[in-house]
Image (tube, coloured by chain):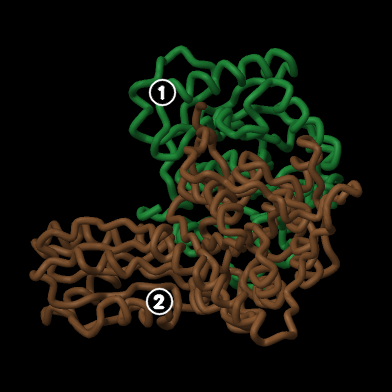
């Protein structure tokens, strides 16, 4: 298929429909509004339904209900809206239902602002909901990657019966890039949804979807079962890009849009004879710990670059396991780091900074 | 450019490249003309609005009008009444950068008393690589919906068919063919072909409309 120019939010919606999403429940918030707007226009054309809920809390609980029917469902919001959805996400994980949740994030805390931010790293990877649950979190760095990951996210959700999050900063939602919609590669054999509440027709026992288990022994068993799934995700679903690690003196770690700025900074540094590499997590959870084994002996330090005051840096430290000094550079509140700022930080680390 | 009417309204589907065209047009016009004002009428998009380049435009002597509420971080749908200044002061050349489809174009309706034939142009920016405006029918619907809410008539087409830095001559020519069909259907001329600078020399020289080289001002280098 030929490439078309699409805004990130539209492209994510189109990818959802391409993946077979039939039902979308959402509530408006900048900078992701074009996504529900797109779904409201396009879903009826594929026999689907768009509902603008009365709140984010309502929307995520509609997702809970919709997912229970076995149909592919999706919701989206931005940072404070995703905060409101946390309770529902925990319930959906507990009830083992598949869905895709998109966070086009903005500056926080609180209402914050509407400019791009990566300050929802903790929220996505640690979760604001209660209990021992995890969800795969995909962080695309381009609109094309957003399209491909959204399509795959639906398969991952179905395979594990678990909510999956796709997170992009506001820039991913708002910027335009050429994209194409290719037939997705079939990577997983998806199980039959024999748990869905589609009506017994008098032929089977009712399927009950619930996250309540008052018997502690039974609930522990459920937790152990969930943990086995999370272990499998950690084993199979890690995704990352290792870029120019050979002979790198400083290895930068950055995801999403920030990784593109870092690559520009790396080009500038390379011209000045300073070798740097990049580890770009594509899954924020499970975090690509194994990528850090590829770091060469030439590396003197790690540098986590984020559009936040420093959140992913915790995971970088865990993955680094005390081997190298871990430094940080970030901008917050909707400010975007420039390649020059990153260049200066690298030089400072290497002792030649301004 | 100097032959265009005094008030230039720039419309188009979102993502067509209106703002990039409007900002480039304003900067070119300011080289030949003292009094140029650019009004950012976008009440739909939160990012990539011409007000983000206010200081760059002001360095060129261009008056920038957007919202009373300062800063790029607001998504309040407000347009400053200052727009009336250059609309009424006929020594000004005014460019109205209108964001986001017919919903966004409603901001123009409030000024409809000023749409005097011969005093304004309304240019529709077309990118054939945007799914909604990739066919004649799509463009005609788009133009009709905007004319319907603004009470102004499109007077010229801008072929701005692109894929950002990946644009090829073939893209531009495919867009040109589409614009020619729309031009014939509506009896509106193609006024400009806006293309990234590196492709300008590769274009055939018998195309309808003036070629306007575009600098990517709205897009950061790292994007």
- From the viewer's perspective, is residue B77 above or below residue B101? below
Judge left or right: residue A147 versus residue A79.
left
Q: Residue at x 44, y 20 (%)?
A: B170
Q: Which mark is residue A312?
A: 2
Position of the C terminus of chain A by quadrant: bottom left
| Residue B66: x %, y % from top left | 66, 62
Q: How many marks?
A: 2
Element marked by disc 2: helix
- From the viewer's perspective, is residue B160 above or below residue B183? below
* Label 2: few (<14), some (14–19) or many (≥20) C-alpha neighbours in 10 Å: many
Residue A107 seen from this side: no
* Label 1: few (<14), some (14–19) or many (≥20) C-alpha neighbours in 10 Å: some
Q: Residue at x 76, y 71 (%)?
A: A210
* Labels 2 and 1 within one chain: no
Q: Residue at x 59, y 26 (%)?
A: B191
| Residue A177: x %, y % from top left | 49, 44
Q: Colour of chain B?
A: green
Please tell me in which quadrant of the rendered image residue B112 appears: top right
| Residue A221: x %, y % from top left | 60, 77
Q: Residue at x 70, y 27 (%)?
A: B139
- From the viewer's perspective, is residue A335 above or below residue A40? below
- From the viewer's perspective, is residue A85 above or below residue A219? above
Element marked by disc 1: helix
Residue A244 seen from this side: yes
Q: Nearer the viewer, residue B72 or A338?
A: A338
Q: Which chain is brown?
A: A
Protein chain holding label 1: B
Q: Nearer the viewer, residue A51 or B141?
A: A51
Judge left or right: residue B118 versus residue A6.
right
Q: Which residue is mark 1?
A: B169
| Residue B145: x %, y % from top left | 81, 35
Real-space Cα separation, disc 2 to disc 1, in angstroms: 43 Å
């Amino acid at each position: 298929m030929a490439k078309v120019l699409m805004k990130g939010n539209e492209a994510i919606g189109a990818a959802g429909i391409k993946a077979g999403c039939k039902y979308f429940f959402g509530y408006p918030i900048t900078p992701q509004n074009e996504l529900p707007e797109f779904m409201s226009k396009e879903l009826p054309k594929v026999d689907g339904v768009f509902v603008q809920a009365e709140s984010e809390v309502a929307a995520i609980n509609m997702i809970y209900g919709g997912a229970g029917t076995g149909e592919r469902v999706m919701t989206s919001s931005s940072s404070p809206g995703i905060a409101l959805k946390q309770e529902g996400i925990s319930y959906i994980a507990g009830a083992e239902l598949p869905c895709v949740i998109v966070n086009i994030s903005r500056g926080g805390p609180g209402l914050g602002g509407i400019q791009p931010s990566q300050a929802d790293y903790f929220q996505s990877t640690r979760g604001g909901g209660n209990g021992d649950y995890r969800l795969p979190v995909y962080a695309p760095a381009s609109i094309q990657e957003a399209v491909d990951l959204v399509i795959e996210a639906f398969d991952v959700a179905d395979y594990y019966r678990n909510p999956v999050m796709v997170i992009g900063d506001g820039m991913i939602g708002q910027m335009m890039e050429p994209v194409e919609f290719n037939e997705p590669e079939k990577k997983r054999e998806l199980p039959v949804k024999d748990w869905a509440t589609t009506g017994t027709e008098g032929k089977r026992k009712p399927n009950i979807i619930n996250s309540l288990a008052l018997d502690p022994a039974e609930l522990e068993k459920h937790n152990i079962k969930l943990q086995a799934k999370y272990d499998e995700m950690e084993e199979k679903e890690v995704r990352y890009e290792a870029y120019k690690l050979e002979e790198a003196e400083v290895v930068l770690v950055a995801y999403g849009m920030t990784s593109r700025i870092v690559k520009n900074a790396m080009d500038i540094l390379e011209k000045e004879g300073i070798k740097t590499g990049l580890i770009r997590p594509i899954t924020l959870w499970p975090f690509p710990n194994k990528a850090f084994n590829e770091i060469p002996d030439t590396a003197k330090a790690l540098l986590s670059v984020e559009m936040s005051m420093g959140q992913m840096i915790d995971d970088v430290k865990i993955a680094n396991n005390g081997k190298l000094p871990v430094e940080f550079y970030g901008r917050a509140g909707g400010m975007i780091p420039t390649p020059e700022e990153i260049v200066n930080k690298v030089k400072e680390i290497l002792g030649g900074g301004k | 450019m100097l032959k265009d009417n005094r008030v230039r309204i720039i419309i188009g589907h979102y993502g067509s490249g209106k703002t990039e065209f409007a900002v480039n047009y304003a900067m070119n016009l300011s080289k030949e003309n003292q009094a140029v004002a650019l009004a950012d009428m976008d009440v739909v998009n939160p990012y990539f609005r011409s007000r983000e380049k206010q200081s760059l435009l002001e360095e060129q002597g261009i008056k920038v009008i957007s919202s009373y509420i300062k800063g790029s971080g607001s998504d309040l749908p407000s347009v400053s009444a200052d727009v009336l200044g250059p609309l009424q002061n006929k020594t000004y050349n005014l460019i109205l950068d209108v964001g986001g489809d017919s919903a966004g174009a409603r901001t123009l309706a409030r000024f409809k008393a000023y749409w005097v034939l011969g005093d304004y142009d309304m240019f529709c920016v077309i990118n054939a690589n945007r799914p909604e405006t990739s066919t004649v029918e799509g463009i005609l619907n788009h133009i009709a919906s905007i004319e319907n809410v603004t009470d102004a008539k499109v007077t010229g087409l801008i072929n701005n068919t692109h894929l950002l830095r990946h644009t090829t001559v073939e893209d531009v020519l495919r867009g040109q063919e589409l614009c020619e069909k729309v031009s014939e259907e509506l009896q509106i001329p193609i006024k400009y072909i806006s293309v990234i600078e590196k492709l300008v020399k590769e274009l055939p020289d018998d195309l309808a409309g003036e070629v306007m080289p575009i600098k990517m001002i709205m897009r950061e280098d790292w994007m």
